[in-house]
Amino acid sequence: AHLDKRHRDLLKALPYELRVRIVLPILRQKALQLDSSPETLRLLDEIGEMYVPRPRDAWPGGLQEPSFMAPTGPAAPISRQSEHTLTSALRSLTLRSLIVSLNRAPAGERQQNTIDDLLHHLRLRSGRLAARA
């Protein structure tokens, strides 16, 4: 699967909160494969927490699945099948492309800054990891 025009249009049409709910689990998995530092966890958690506050006792240190990953609230504006094919296509994207897919969405300044911080942090970390190899 790849992110074709249909998938890009669907992603663009989604409300930002739903886009985060779909993209973030994949982004989290790919980012943690590159770098599982506390700063990476903090930035990923912060992106998710901007939309659904976490319960007090949930996922300290980002070790458990965040509550915003579970579908809640009103029904999603896309079908399960469309979400499934979109998710499959998103899995084929690079880490940078996933971050950019969130960055292109209309978001507030705080969200934009956090996404930019994550991209910058991962660039620095990947450079350090490559230098050690």
Image (spheres, rainbow, N blue to C red):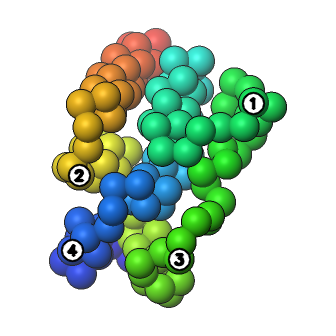
Mark sitting earlier along the chain (4/1): 4
Q: Badge 3, how many Cα within 10 Å: few under 14, some, many 20+?
A: few
- Foreground label between 3 and 4: 3
Mark sitting earlier along the chain (3/4): 4
Name above or below for residue 131 compared with residue 120. Answer: above
The x and y percentages for residue 123 are 32, 24
Query: For the residue marked with disc 4, what is the amino acid?
Result: Asp
How far is mark 4 from mark 2, CA to CA? Answer: 12 Å
Q: Which residue is mark 2?
A: 105
- Foreground label between 4 and 1: 1
Identify the mark at residue 56; answer none if there is no mark: 1
Query: For the residue marked with disc 1, what is the amino acid?
Result: Arg
The x and y percentages for residue 24 are 48, 49
Mark sitting earlier along the chain (4/2): 4
Residue located 33% across and 35% down the image = 111
Mark sitting earlier along the chain (2/3): 3
Residue located 41% across and 19% down the image = 125
The x and y percentages for residue 131 are 38, 13
Task: Verify CB contact (< 8 Å) between mark 3 and mark 4.
Answer: no
Query: For the residue marked with disc 3, what is the amino acid?
Result: Ala
Q: Which residue is mark 4?
A: 9
Residue located 43% across and 61% down the image = 18
The x and y percentages for residue 43 are 47, 27
Query: For the residue marked with disc 2, what is the amino acid?
Result: Ala
Q: Badge 2, how many Cα within 10 Å: few under 14, some, many 20+?
A: some
Q: Which residue is mark 3?
A: 75
- Foreground label between 4 and 2: 2
Q: Badge 1, how many Cα within 10 Å: few under 14, some, many 20+?
A: few
Left or right side of 32 for 122: left
Can residue 44 be seen at all in this image of the molecule? Answer: no
Task: Verify CB contact (< 8 Å) between mark 2 and mark 1.
Answer: no
